[in-house]
Amino acid sequence: MKTIEAIEAETKSVAKDLRLVLHQVKYEQMAFWVNKTGAIFTLGFSVLFLVLLGATNGSQTISSLHNITNNQFYVPGFAAYGVMSACFTMLAINLVTRRETGLLKRLRLSPLPAWALLAAIYISTAIVAVSQVAVILIIGRIGYGVQFPSNWLALALVLIVGIACFTAMGVAISSVIPNQETAGPVTSIAFFLLLFLSGLWFPIAPTSGLATFSKFFPVYHLLQAMAAPFQLQPGVSAWAWGDLGIIGIWGVGCGLIALRRFRWSPRRG
Amino acid sequence: MPALSVNSLFKSYGGVHAVSDVSFEVARGDVFALLGPNGAGKTTTIEILEGFHKRDGGDVRVLGVDPGERHNQRWLRTRIGVVLQEMAVESFFSVRQVLERNAGFYPSPRRVGEVIELVGLCDKTDVKVKKLSGGQQRRLDIGLGIIGNPKLLFLDEPTTGLDPAARRMTWDLIRTLSDQGTTVMLSSHYMDEVEALAQHVVVLAKGQIAASGTPWSLGGREFGKVVISFTLPEGVAIADLPVQTSRCAGGKVEVDTDCEIEVLARLTNWSMESHHSISGLSVMRQTLEDVYLKLTHDAEQRAEPVVA
């Protein structure tokens, strides 16, 4: 019979655990890219919107935003969209589907520790989000001549905070969605409504009633924070601390909900 | 040390006892079956043993350690294999990919090729899971249960929903694993399955043990009533027979008895002496299903849902 010390010695090996996480990340990535619908919905949509909107009215200028072009407005916007769709919509649907089909429960009963699974899901989601942002920036630069951000460090911070917050939101909302059938509609409607109100498709005046409402939610702030490192308007800092702070608060709040409410097993009929 | 020991296990959900005072032991290398109707507490019991649910009371040892203790769980999970009632395999991976993925979780897994051969999916190695039939998916599911080379394998209703051929293949697989020394804990509501595979069986009803023993002795089955039946010879009336009949329909006579030797002796002697040939003679001991239905029915009668 094994002693507790022996059991602990066997389970506590950091290098082994990291290998386990990377092993799972590999399969999370495979699952994402093999499942073409998911890949198209996240990667494809942000690119499609950017290309369509850019082709429609991309070179017009926006007088309320110091005459930046629409394209300059859309590029950070759809970079933010990419982060949110990967971390929030995609992740929530993915988790609900895996939970309700028993896949999460099955993994829970394998030797893969819960934290390692969640870390792998998080890393994999972050890879998708960052690759989305990269694709949008490159298309913006090559297709529409939109300059890369002038402050890469600030962009990196926005990505770190944004990905952490929206991943937490994705996990939190997945824990309150009852079944697979409602996962898609619930997350998509919530997401698109907030995107609309937060001024992704058209700029909203910062002092309007709509802006006051939108400012309560993190979507508005991620759009603002993502635009800041491009420093399109004179005198605007690349570091949107206020926006990042609010995003962070949402992240912590949703993280707590996620920890409390997370379920491994399907709801029984 | 037994592979599994359960002592006075209790678990309730929302004030209702799901499992109540259940005790049993499973020796290493045995195939052990939990039998019972839906809602009898089979899955709850198994999931407590797997460490997925916490118990409310009693003592549980799986491979010598308590599955309810957090620090034991990872150690335990590298040594047990689990096949859940709900089939759960990622549909967009190939057979080889899912097995390779899960193999990576274990310190000393079986070879992927060996598992594919064991579960009989050699010609489906690179086929996507969603293209497999239900039976093939279930076998892959069992393959995932054994990829870690477990000492103890939990199978929760492994053949529910399978066609007869797929069930037989699954039985063969379970026998093979058992022969290789794996302890198997099985739940089922198929009597023939339990009879074909298990050395020991516990019948659960309403969360309690209704009976336990070997499949062939359950509920006093080796001594119980038998039914002797035969075709009534032509020109013979029921009253002419040397034995007390229980039923007669369409020329078929049935005798219920618990001293079958005596009844048979009287019948055969009478047949030889009176030159009435008896055709279609059969002696049927009550089936495990009869015993099971009676046991679970009795338990239902006894126990209305117990409120904690």
Image (cartoon, coloured by chain):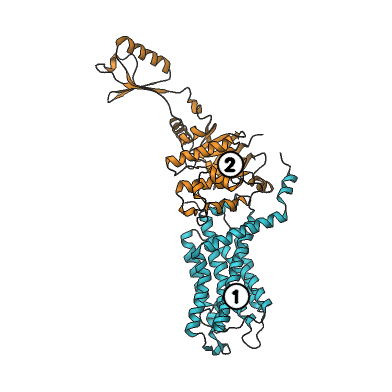
Of the 4 image quadrants, the one containing the C terminus of chain B is: top right
Residue that badge 1 annotates: A222
Horizontally, is B222 left or right of A153 in the view? left
Among the 4 quarters of the image, the one containing residue A33: bottom right
Q: State the residue in front, B134 or B43.
A: B134
Q: State the image coordinates of residue B149 (x, y, percent, origin top left).
A: 62, 43
Q: Which of marks 2 and 1 is in front?
A: 2
User: Label 1 neighbourhood size at 10 Å, few (<14), some (14-19), many (20+)?
Assistant: many
Q: Which residue is drawn at 62% across and 87% down?
A: A233
Q: The orange chain is which one?
A: B
Checking the image for residue B153, the label placed there is: 2
Q: Which residue lies furthest to the top in this view?
A: B273
Q: State the image coordinates of residue A44 (x, y, percent, origin top left).
A: 51, 71
Q: Residue at x 56, y 48 (%)?
A: B144
State which chain disc 1 sits on: A
Q: Can residue B206 be seen in this view?
A: no
Q: State the residue in front, A189 or B273.
A: B273
User: Label 2 neighbourhood size at 10 Å, few (<14), some (14-19), many (20+)?
Assistant: many
Looking at the rendered structure, the secondary structure element under dot 2 is strand
Q: State the image coordinates of residue B294 (x, y, percent, origin top left).
A: 44, 31
- In the rendered image of the structure, the colour used to display chain A is cyan
B130 shown above or below B59: below
Check disc 2 and give the amino acid type.
Answer: Leu
State which chain disc 2 sits on: B
Q: Is residue B129 visible?
A: yes
A36 shown above or below B282: below
Check disc 1 and give the amino acid type.
Answer: Leu
Looking at the rendered structure, the secondary structure element under dot 1 is helix
Give the Cα distance between marks 2 and 1: 49 Å
Horizontally, is A125 left or right of B240 in the view? right
Q: Residue furthest front?
A: B123
